[in-house]
Amino acid sequence: MADTTAQSGFRSFAEFYPFYLGEHANRTCRRLHFVGTSIGTALLIAAVVTLSFWYLLAGLVAGYAFAWIGHFFFEKNRPATFKYPVWSFMGDYAMYRDIWMGRIPF
């Protein structure tokens, strides 16, 4: 098995999260992430309730579409998802939580 620490440079999510937040310094980008995560989560719940694959697919598309628009047009960087898919997904929800809790400005 490959050593993911050597590949990523991060040994834990706690090390990764400050990097992730730095990639989301633009307020509009964060807002688009928040909207995309909200829609994606609602559609994920709908997928579980209805057992419909289409809601799951729509949730992924909606979540990533809002996030990538934020990165490409406002943040002007490449989404961390391309290099760190699992930690970026976790970062989306950590940032979502932190915005709800008022730790990060909306």
Image (cartoon, rainbow, N blue to C red):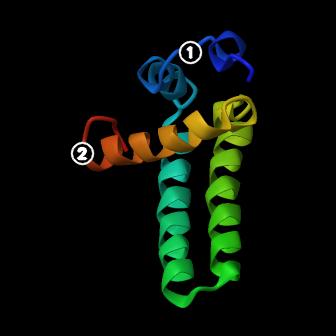
Which residue matches tag 2?
101
Pick the front one: 16 or 38: 16
Residue drawn at (62%, 68%), measured in percent from left and top?
A: 59
Residue drawn at (72%, 15%), measured in percent from left and top?
A: 7
Residue 40, image quadrant: bottom right
Q: Quadrant of the C terminus?
A: top left
Which residue matches tag 1?
10
| Tag 2 near tag 1, CB within 8 Å | no
Residue drawn at (47%, 26%), measured in percent from left and top?
A: 13
Q: Is residue 33 above or below residue 53?
A: above
Query: What amino acid is at disc 2?
Result: Met
On the image, the x and y values in percent for residue 69 come to 70, 48
Lateral position of residue 25 relative to residue 66, left or right: left
Q: Is residue 51 above or below residue 44?
A: below
Helix, strand, or loop for circle 1?
loop
Query: What amino acid is at disc 1?
Result: Phe
Q: From this viewpoint, which residue is outermost toward the bottom? A: 50
Pick the front one: 4 or 16: 4
On the image, the x and y values in percent for residue 17 come to 46, 26
On the image, the x and y values in percent for residue 65 come to 70, 56
Helix, strand, or loop for circle 2?
loop
On the image, the x and y values in percent for residue 88 come to 58, 37
Residue 14, image quadrant: top left
Lateral position of residue 97 relative to residue 34, left or right: left
Compare marks 2 and 1 and give the one earlier in the sequence.
1
Which mark lies nearer to you, 2 or 1? Answer: 1
Q: CA distance from mark 2 to mark 1?
A: 26 Å
Q: Is residue 100 above or below residue 79?
A: below
Disc 1 crowd, CA 10 A, few/some/many (<14, 14-19, 20+):
some
Q: Quadrant of the N terminus?
A: top right
